[in-house]
Image (tube, rainbow, N blue to C red):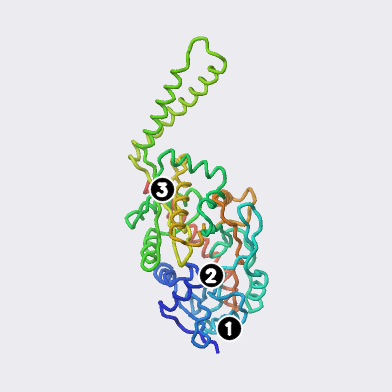
Amino acid sequence: MYKLVNLEKKEYEEFVKNSKKSHFLQSYAWGEFSKKEKKLTPYYLGLKKEKKIVASALLLQKKLPFSYSYFYCPRGFVLDYEDEEVFNNMTKETIKFIKGKKGIFLKIDPDIIRKSYNYLDEENKLEYDSEKIFNMIKKAGFKHLGFTKNFETNEPRYTFRINLDQSLEDIKDHFSKTTKQRINKAKKLNTIVEIGNEKDLDQFYHLMTLTEERKDFISYSKEYYKELYKIFNIDNKMTLFLGKVNLEDMLKTLTNEKDELEKNINNIPKEKLSKSNKNKLQELNKKLDKLNIDIEKYDNYKKEYGKIVTLNAHMIIEYADKAWVLYAGNHNILTETYANYNTYLKHIEFCKERNLKIYDQFGTIGDLNKNNSRLGLHEFKKKFGGDYIEFLGEFDYITNKLMYIVFNNLVPFYRKIVKRKSKKELKNEVNRNR
Protein backbone atom coordinates (compact mmCIF):
# COMPACT_ATOMS: atom_id res chain seq x y z
CA MET A 1 0.00 0.00 0.00
CA TYR A 2 2.81 2.39 0.98
CA LYS A 3 6.07 2.51 -0.95
CA LEU A 4 9.25 4.54 -0.36
CA VAL A 5 10.83 5.77 -3.58
CA ASN A 6 13.58 8.10 -4.76
CA LEU A 7 12.08 11.32 -6.12
CA GLU A 8 13.34 13.40 -9.01
CA LYS A 9 14.04 17.07 -8.29
CA LYS A 10 10.84 18.49 -9.80
CA GLU A 11 8.52 16.03 -8.08
CA TYR A 12 10.34 16.37 -4.75
CA GLU A 13 10.38 20.17 -4.75
CA GLU A 14 6.74 20.44 -5.77
CA PHE A 15 5.65 18.33 -2.80
CA VAL A 16 7.88 20.06 -0.24
CA LYS A 17 7.10 23.61 -1.34
CA ASN A 18 3.35 22.95 -1.21
CA SER A 19 3.59 21.55 2.32
CA LYS A 20 2.52 23.75 5.23
CA LYS A 21 5.71 22.72 7.05
CA SER A 22 8.10 23.45 4.15
CA HIS A 23 11.57 24.50 5.28
CA PHE A 24 14.74 25.45 3.41
CA LEU A 25 16.57 22.69 5.31
CA GLN A 26 14.33 20.17 3.51
CA SER A 27 14.97 21.66 0.08
CA TYR A 28 16.69 19.99 -2.84
CA ALA A 29 19.18 22.88 -2.81
CA TRP A 30 20.15 22.18 0.81
CA GLY A 31 20.81 18.57 -0.12
CA GLU A 32 23.06 19.59 -3.01
CA PHE A 33 24.83 22.15 -0.85
CA SER A 34 25.37 19.55 1.90
CA LYS A 35 26.90 17.21 -0.68
CA LYS A 36 29.30 19.87 -1.93
CA GLU A 37 30.35 21.60 1.30
CA LYS A 38 29.59 19.12 4.09
CA LYS A 39 30.58 15.95 2.23
CA LEU A 40 27.19 14.35 3.02
CA THR A 41 25.24 12.12 0.65
CA PRO A 42 21.67 13.37 0.07
CA TYR A 43 18.67 11.16 -0.66
CA TYR A 44 15.39 12.69 -1.79
CA LEU A 45 12.76 10.22 -0.71
CA GLY A 46 9.01 10.12 -1.08
CA LEU A 47 6.39 7.87 0.48
CA LYS A 48 3.70 7.01 -2.04
CA LYS A 49 0.24 5.68 -1.37
CA GLU A 50 -1.46 4.50 -4.55
CA LYS A 51 0.98 6.57 -6.67
CA LYS A 52 0.31 9.76 -4.67
CA ILE A 53 3.10 11.30 -2.55
CA VAL A 54 1.95 11.59 1.07
CA ALA A 55 5.35 12.27 2.72
CA SER A 56 8.90 13.14 1.81
CA ALA A 57 12.29 13.35 3.46
CA LEU A 58 15.71 14.77 2.70
CA LEU A 59 18.08 12.24 4.27
CA LEU A 60 21.70 13.29 4.69
CA GLN A 61 24.09 10.37 5.08
CA LYS A 62 27.34 10.79 6.99
CA LYS A 63 29.72 7.94 6.25
CA LEU A 64 31.71 6.50 9.14
CA PRO A 65 34.59 4.01 9.37
CA PHE A 66 33.95 0.31 8.64
CA SER A 67 31.14 1.14 6.16
CA TYR A 68 28.84 2.40 8.92
CA SER A 69 26.93 5.65 8.61
CA TYR A 70 24.29 7.75 10.30
CA PHE A 71 21.43 9.71 8.77
CA TYR A 72 20.00 13.12 9.54
CA CYS A 73 16.64 14.36 8.31
CA PRO A 74 16.79 18.14 8.96
CA ARG A 75 13.52 19.54 10.30
CA GLY A 76 12.02 16.06 10.11
CA PHE A 77 9.81 14.30 7.61
CA VAL A 78 7.58 16.48 5.44
CA LEU A 79 4.08 15.20 6.14
CA ASP A 80 0.91 15.80 8.11
CA TYR A 81 1.99 15.03 11.69
CA GLU A 82 -1.62 14.61 12.74
CA ASP A 83 -1.85 11.57 10.45
CA GLU A 84 -0.35 8.80 12.59
CA GLU A 85 -0.74 6.15 9.90
CA VAL A 86 1.35 8.10 7.40
CA PHE A 87 3.96 8.97 10.03
CA ASN A 88 4.31 5.36 11.15
CA ASN A 89 4.64 4.09 7.59
CA MET A 90 7.17 6.79 6.73
CA THR A 91 9.18 5.81 9.82
CA LYS A 92 9.02 2.09 9.05
CA GLU A 93 10.07 2.48 5.41
CA THR A 94 12.82 5.00 6.17
CA ILE A 95 14.32 2.81 8.90
CA LYS A 96 14.29 -0.11 6.45
CA PHE A 97 16.12 2.13 3.96
CA ILE A 98 18.89 3.22 6.36
CA LYS A 99 19.40 -0.30 7.73
CA GLY A 100 20.15 -1.33 4.16
CA LYS A 101 23.03 1.18 4.20
CA LYS A 102 24.42 0.17 7.63
CA GLY A 103 22.94 3.23 9.29
CA ILE A 104 23.39 3.20 13.06
CA PHE A 105 20.70 5.80 13.74
CA LEU A 106 18.34 8.32 12.15
CA LYS A 107 18.06 11.81 13.62
CA ILE A 108 15.03 14.06 13.07
CA ASP A 109 14.11 17.46 14.53
CA PRO A 110 10.59 18.19 13.23
CA ASP A 111 9.40 21.72 12.53
CA ILE A 112 6.69 21.14 15.14
CA ILE A 113 6.10 23.93 17.65
CA ARG A 114 5.86 22.83 21.26
CA LYS A 115 4.96 26.27 22.64
CA SER A 116 4.61 29.77 21.21
CA TYR A 117 4.33 33.19 22.88
CA ASN A 118 3.44 36.52 21.31
CA TYR A 119 5.25 39.84 21.78
CA LEU A 120 3.28 40.42 25.01
CA ASP A 121 4.52 37.05 26.38
CA GLU A 122 1.01 35.60 26.09
CA GLU A 123 0.87 31.95 25.02
CA ASN A 124 -0.49 31.41 21.50
CA LYS A 125 -2.99 28.65 20.79
CA LEU A 126 -1.49 26.09 18.41
CA GLU A 127 -3.23 24.56 15.39
CA TYR A 128 -2.41 21.07 16.65
CA ASP A 129 -1.83 19.12 19.86
CA SER A 130 1.96 19.18 20.17
CA GLU A 131 1.96 16.79 23.15
CA LYS A 132 0.04 14.22 21.14
CA ILE A 133 2.53 14.50 18.25
CA PHE A 134 5.46 14.23 20.70
CA ASN A 135 4.05 11.00 22.15
CA MET A 136 3.33 9.62 18.66
CA ILE A 137 6.97 10.11 17.62
CA LYS A 138 8.23 8.34 20.76
CA LYS A 139 5.70 5.56 20.34
CA ALA A 140 7.05 4.95 16.81
CA GLY A 141 10.45 4.10 18.32
CA PHE A 142 12.28 7.43 18.45
CA LYS A 143 14.30 8.45 21.50
CA HIS A 144 13.85 12.11 22.53
CA LEU A 145 17.17 13.85 23.28
CA GLY A 146 15.76 16.29 25.83
CA PHE A 147 14.38 19.81 25.99
CA THR A 148 17.71 21.57 25.51
CA LYS A 149 17.90 25.28 26.25
CA ASN A 150 20.83 26.62 24.25
CA PHE A 151 22.49 25.67 20.95
CA GLU A 152 23.30 22.03 21.71
CA THR A 153 21.28 20.67 18.78
CA ASN A 154 21.98 20.61 15.02
CA GLU A 155 19.40 23.35 14.44
CA PRO A 156 18.04 25.89 16.94
CA ARG A 157 15.30 24.62 19.27
CA TYR A 158 14.09 28.17 19.84
CA THR A 159 13.51 31.04 17.46
CA PHE A 160 11.52 34.21 16.86
CA ARG A 161 9.05 34.29 13.97
CA ILE A 162 7.08 37.21 12.58
CA ASN A 163 3.76 36.48 10.91
CA LEU A 164 3.88 38.50 7.68
CA ASP A 165 0.13 38.18 7.15
CA GLN A 166 -0.15 41.15 9.51
CA SER A 167 -0.03 44.67 8.11
CA LEU A 168 3.39 46.33 8.09
CA GLU A 169 2.00 48.93 10.51
CA ASP A 170 1.05 46.19 13.00
CA ILE A 171 4.43 44.51 12.63
CA LYS A 172 6.28 47.76 13.35
CA ASP A 173 3.88 48.58 16.18
CA HIS A 174 5.06 45.40 17.93
CA PHE A 175 8.67 46.61 17.89
CA SER A 176 9.94 47.65 21.32
CA LYS A 177 10.13 51.36 22.15
CA THR A 178 13.93 51.34 22.03
CA THR A 179 13.91 49.60 18.64
CA LYS A 180 11.67 52.30 17.18
CA GLN A 181 13.93 55.01 18.64
CA ARG A 182 17.07 53.39 17.29
CA ILE A 183 15.61 52.95 13.81
CA ASN A 184 14.69 56.64 13.82
CA LYS A 185 18.22 57.58 14.92
CA ALA A 186 19.73 55.33 12.22
CA LYS A 187 17.66 57.14 9.58
CA LYS A 188 18.60 60.54 10.99
CA LEU A 189 22.28 59.62 10.76
CA ASN A 190 21.92 58.74 7.07
CA THR A 191 22.39 54.98 7.37
CA ILE A 192 21.37 53.20 4.18
CA VAL A 193 20.52 49.62 3.26
CA GLU A 194 21.41 48.16 -0.14
CA ILE A 195 21.00 44.76 -1.79
CA GLY A 196 24.40 43.23 -2.43
CA ASN A 197 25.59 40.65 -4.94
CA GLU A 198 28.25 37.97 -5.27
CA LYS A 199 31.01 40.60 -5.34
CA ASP A 200 30.04 41.68 -1.83
CA LEU A 201 30.55 38.25 -0.27
CA ASP A 202 34.16 39.05 0.65
CA GLN A 203 32.91 42.02 2.68
CA PHE A 204 30.19 39.84 4.22
CA TYR A 205 32.78 37.25 5.22
CA HIS A 206 35.02 39.87 6.81
CA LEU A 207 32.11 41.11 8.95
CA MET A 208 31.27 37.51 9.91
CA THR A 209 34.84 36.94 11.16
CA LEU A 210 34.64 40.10 13.29
CA THR A 211 31.30 38.96 14.73
CA GLU A 212 32.59 35.47 15.44
CA GLU A 213 35.66 36.77 17.26
CA ARG A 214 33.51 39.15 19.33
CA LYS A 215 30.82 36.59 20.18
CA ASP A 216 33.25 33.65 20.56
CA PHE A 217 31.61 31.24 18.13
CA ILE A 218 32.88 29.49 15.02
CA SER A 219 31.12 29.60 11.69
CA TYR A 220 32.34 28.71 8.21
CA SER A 221 34.89 29.44 5.51
CA LYS A 222 34.52 32.06 2.81
CA GLU A 223 34.05 29.29 0.22
CA TYR A 224 31.16 27.88 2.30
CA TYR A 225 29.20 31.15 2.11
CA LYS A 226 29.97 31.64 -1.58
CA GLU A 227 28.77 28.15 -2.47
CA LEU A 228 25.61 28.57 -0.37
CA TYR A 229 24.82 31.87 -2.09
CA LYS A 230 25.43 30.35 -5.52
CA ILE A 231 23.34 27.19 -5.01
CA PHE A 232 20.35 28.88 -3.41
CA ASN A 233 20.17 31.50 -6.14
CA ILE A 234 19.69 28.84 -8.85
CA ASP A 235 16.05 27.93 -8.11
CA ASN A 236 15.27 29.90 -4.95
CA LYS A 237 16.48 33.19 -3.57
CA MET A 238 19.20 34.26 -1.19
CA THR A 239 19.54 38.00 -0.67
CA LEU A 240 22.50 39.84 0.81
CA PHE A 241 21.52 43.02 2.69
CA LEU A 242 24.24 45.58 3.33
CA GLY A 243 23.77 48.17 6.07
CA LYS A 244 25.98 51.18 5.40
CA VAL A 245 26.67 54.62 6.72
CA ASN A 246 27.54 57.56 4.48
CA LEU A 247 29.96 59.49 6.68
CA GLU A 248 30.01 62.46 4.35
CA ASP A 249 26.22 62.85 4.51
CA MET A 250 26.28 62.22 8.25
CA LEU A 251 28.83 65.00 8.75
CA LYS A 252 26.70 67.38 6.67
CA THR A 253 23.66 66.57 8.84
CA LEU A 254 25.62 67.09 12.06
CA THR A 255 27.23 70.29 10.75
CA ASN A 256 23.81 71.69 9.84
CA GLU A 257 22.57 70.76 13.30
CA LYS A 258 25.60 72.50 14.80
CA ASP A 259 24.94 75.66 12.76
CA GLU A 260 21.33 75.68 13.96
CA LEU A 261 22.43 75.24 17.58
CA GLU A 262 24.94 78.07 17.34
CA LYS A 263 22.25 80.30 15.87
CA ASN A 264 19.93 79.50 18.78
CA ILE A 265 22.74 80.16 21.28
CA ASN A 266 23.54 83.52 19.69
CA ASN A 267 19.86 84.52 19.80
CA ILE A 268 19.78 84.28 23.58
CA PRO A 269 20.52 87.70 25.13
CA LYS A 270 23.72 87.38 27.17
CA GLU A 271 23.13 90.33 29.51
CA LYS A 272 21.07 89.89 32.64
CA LEU A 273 20.20 86.30 31.84
CA SER A 274 16.95 85.07 33.38
CA LYS A 275 17.07 81.74 35.20
CA SER A 276 15.18 80.00 32.38
CA ASN A 277 17.50 81.48 29.71
CA LYS A 278 20.53 80.53 31.76
CA ASN A 279 19.32 76.91 31.98
CA LYS A 280 18.48 76.94 28.28
CA LEU A 281 21.94 78.23 27.39
CA GLN A 282 23.61 75.56 29.50
CA GLU A 283 21.56 72.85 27.79
CA LEU A 284 22.34 74.19 24.30
CA ASN A 285 26.06 74.40 25.05
CA LYS A 286 26.04 70.81 26.29
CA LYS A 287 24.47 69.71 23.01
CA LEU A 288 27.01 71.77 21.07
CA ASP A 289 29.91 70.17 22.93
CA LYS A 290 28.48 66.72 22.19
CA LEU A 291 28.06 67.61 18.51
CA ASN A 292 31.65 68.86 18.24
CA ILE A 293 32.90 65.58 19.72
CA ASP A 294 30.75 63.57 17.29
CA ILE A 295 31.83 65.63 14.27
CA GLU A 296 35.50 65.14 15.14
CA LYS A 297 34.98 61.41 15.71
CA TYR A 298 33.11 60.80 12.45
CA ASP A 299 35.58 62.94 10.53
CA ASN A 300 38.37 60.68 11.82
CA TYR A 301 36.38 57.60 10.77
CA LYS A 302 35.96 59.11 7.31
CA LYS A 303 39.71 59.63 7.03
CA GLU A 304 40.36 56.02 8.06
CA TYR A 305 37.52 54.14 6.29
CA GLY A 306 36.44 56.43 3.46
CA LYS A 307 33.15 58.12 2.60
CA ILE A 308 30.92 55.02 2.92
CA VAL A 309 31.41 52.19 5.45
CA THR A 310 29.59 48.84 5.39
CA LEU A 311 28.61 48.04 8.98
CA ASN A 312 26.26 45.06 8.54
CA ALA A 313 25.86 42.25 6.03
CA HIS A 314 22.92 39.86 6.45
CA MET A 315 22.02 36.75 4.42
CA ILE A 316 18.27 36.17 4.02
CA ILE A 317 17.16 32.90 2.47
CA GLU A 318 13.72 32.31 0.94
CA TYR A 319 12.04 28.98 0.39
CA ALA A 320 8.39 28.46 -0.56
CA ASP A 321 6.46 31.11 1.42
CA LYS A 322 9.00 31.67 4.21
CA ALA A 323 12.26 33.54 4.87
CA TRP A 324 15.07 33.02 7.38
CA VAL A 325 17.76 35.40 8.60
CA LEU A 326 20.46 32.83 8.16
CA TYR A 327 23.66 34.76 8.91
CA ALA A 328 24.38 38.28 10.16
CA GLY A 329 27.83 39.85 10.26
CA ASN A 330 28.35 43.19 12.01
CA HIS A 331 31.25 45.60 12.32
CA ASN A 332 32.54 46.57 15.76
CA ILE A 333 32.64 50.32 14.98
CA LEU A 334 29.92 52.99 14.69
CA THR A 335 27.45 50.86 16.64
CA GLU A 336 25.89 54.08 17.94
CA THR A 337 24.48 54.70 14.44
CA TYR A 338 22.18 51.66 14.93
CA ALA A 339 22.58 50.73 11.27
CA ASN A 340 21.91 47.11 12.27
CA TYR A 341 18.36 47.98 13.37
CA ASN A 342 17.65 49.73 10.08
CA THR A 343 18.99 46.71 8.17
CA TYR A 344 16.59 44.38 10.01
CA LEU A 345 13.68 46.70 9.27
CA LYS A 346 14.55 46.73 5.57
CA HIS A 347 14.62 42.95 5.19
CA ILE A 348 11.32 42.64 7.08
CA GLU A 349 9.82 45.15 4.63
CA PHE A 350 11.44 43.29 1.72
CA CYS A 351 9.92 39.94 2.79
CA LYS A 352 6.53 41.57 3.29
CA GLU A 353 6.66 43.10 -0.21
CA ARG A 354 7.42 39.66 -1.66
CA ASN A 355 4.20 38.31 -0.09
CA LEU A 356 6.00 35.80 2.10
CA LYS A 357 4.10 34.42 5.09
CA ILE A 358 6.78 33.82 7.74
CA TYR A 359 9.96 35.71 8.69
CA ASP A 360 12.17 33.56 10.93
CA GLN A 361 15.12 35.01 12.84
CA PHE A 362 16.64 31.52 12.95
CA GLY A 363 17.75 30.86 16.44
CA THR A 364 17.68 32.02 20.04
CA ILE A 365 17.92 30.45 23.50
CA GLY A 366 15.54 28.94 26.02
CA ASP A 367 17.80 29.52 29.02
CA LEU A 368 17.03 33.13 29.93
CA ASN A 369 19.28 33.25 32.98
CA LYS A 370 20.93 36.68 33.28
CA ASN A 371 24.37 35.03 33.27
CA ASN A 372 23.80 33.33 29.91
CA SER A 373 26.29 34.81 27.43
CA ARG A 374 23.69 34.50 24.65
CA LEU A 375 21.04 36.55 26.48
CA GLY A 376 22.00 39.71 24.58
CA LEU A 377 21.29 37.96 21.26
CA HIS A 378 17.90 36.85 22.58
CA GLU A 379 16.94 40.31 23.84
CA PHE A 380 17.98 41.91 20.54
CA LYS A 381 15.81 39.57 18.46
CA LYS A 382 12.90 39.86 20.89
CA LYS A 383 12.79 43.64 20.33
CA PHE A 384 11.38 43.08 16.82
CA GLY A 385 8.12 41.71 18.24
CA GLY A 386 8.03 38.22 16.74
CA ASP A 387 6.47 35.14 18.31
CA TYR A 388 8.85 33.29 20.64
CA ILE A 389 8.85 29.70 19.36
CA GLU A 390 9.96 26.46 21.03
CA PHE A 391 10.25 23.30 18.89
CA LEU A 392 9.94 19.70 20.09
CA GLY A 393 13.66 19.08 19.70
CA GLU A 394 15.75 16.19 18.38
CA PHE A 395 14.82 12.51 18.23
CA ASP A 396 17.05 9.55 17.36
CA TYR A 397 15.85 6.22 16.04
CA ILE A 398 18.64 3.81 17.03
CA THR A 399 19.26 0.84 14.74
CA ASN A 400 22.63 -0.29 16.15
CA LYS A 401 22.89 0.24 19.92
CA LEU A 402 26.56 -0.64 20.31
CA MET A 403 27.79 1.62 17.49
CA TYR A 404 25.43 4.38 18.68
CA ILE A 405 27.13 4.34 22.11
CA VAL A 406 30.58 4.40 20.50
CA PHE A 407 29.55 7.28 18.24
CA ASN A 408 28.14 9.39 21.09
CA ASN A 409 31.30 8.94 23.16
CA LEU A 410 33.80 9.78 20.42
CA VAL A 411 32.08 12.61 18.55
CA PRO A 412 32.04 15.20 21.40
CA PHE A 413 35.79 14.67 21.89
CA TYR A 414 36.43 15.10 18.15
CA ARG A 415 34.32 18.25 17.97
CA LYS A 416 36.29 19.87 20.81
CA ILE A 417 39.51 19.38 18.83
CA VAL A 418 37.93 20.82 15.67
CA LYS A 419 36.54 23.83 17.58
CA ARG A 420 39.92 24.59 19.15
CA LYS A 421 41.59 24.43 15.73
CA SER A 422 38.88 26.61 14.14
CA LYS A 423 39.26 29.28 16.84
CA LYS A 424 42.98 29.52 16.10
CA GLU A 425 42.32 29.80 12.35
CA LEU A 426 39.63 32.46 12.97
CA LYS A 427 42.01 34.56 15.07
CA ASN A 428 44.63 34.42 12.30
CA GLU A 429 42.00 35.37 9.68
CA VAL A 430 40.81 38.39 11.69
CA ASN A 431 44.38 39.58 12.27
CA ARG A 432 45.15 39.33 8.54
CA ASN A 433 42.11 41.49 7.67
CA ARG A 434 42.69 44.23 10.21
Amino acid at the residue labelled 1: Asn
Label 2 SS = loop
Q: Nearer the viewer, residue 361 or 406?
A: 361
Instruction: Say whether marks 3 and 1 touch (CB < 8 Å).
Output: no
Cα–Cα gap, marks 3 and 2 = 31 Å
The number of discs equals: 3
Q: Nearer the viewer, residue 95 or 271?
A: 271
Q: Residues within 10 Å of mark 1 (few under 14, many from 20)?
A: some
The residue tagged 2 is 21
For the point 39% across and 36% down, which residue is it? 250
Label 1 SS = helix
Q: Residues within 10 Å of mark 2 (few under 14, many from 20)?
A: many
For the point 35% across and 42% down, which residue is it? 308
The residue tagged 3 is 243
Looking at the image, is 277 positioned above or below residue 205? Answer: above
Q: Looking at the image, tell me whether mark 3 or mark 2 is earlier in sequence order.
A: 2
Residue 314 point in image, percent of width and height: 43, 54
The residue tagged 1 is 89
Amino acid at the residue labelled 3: Gly
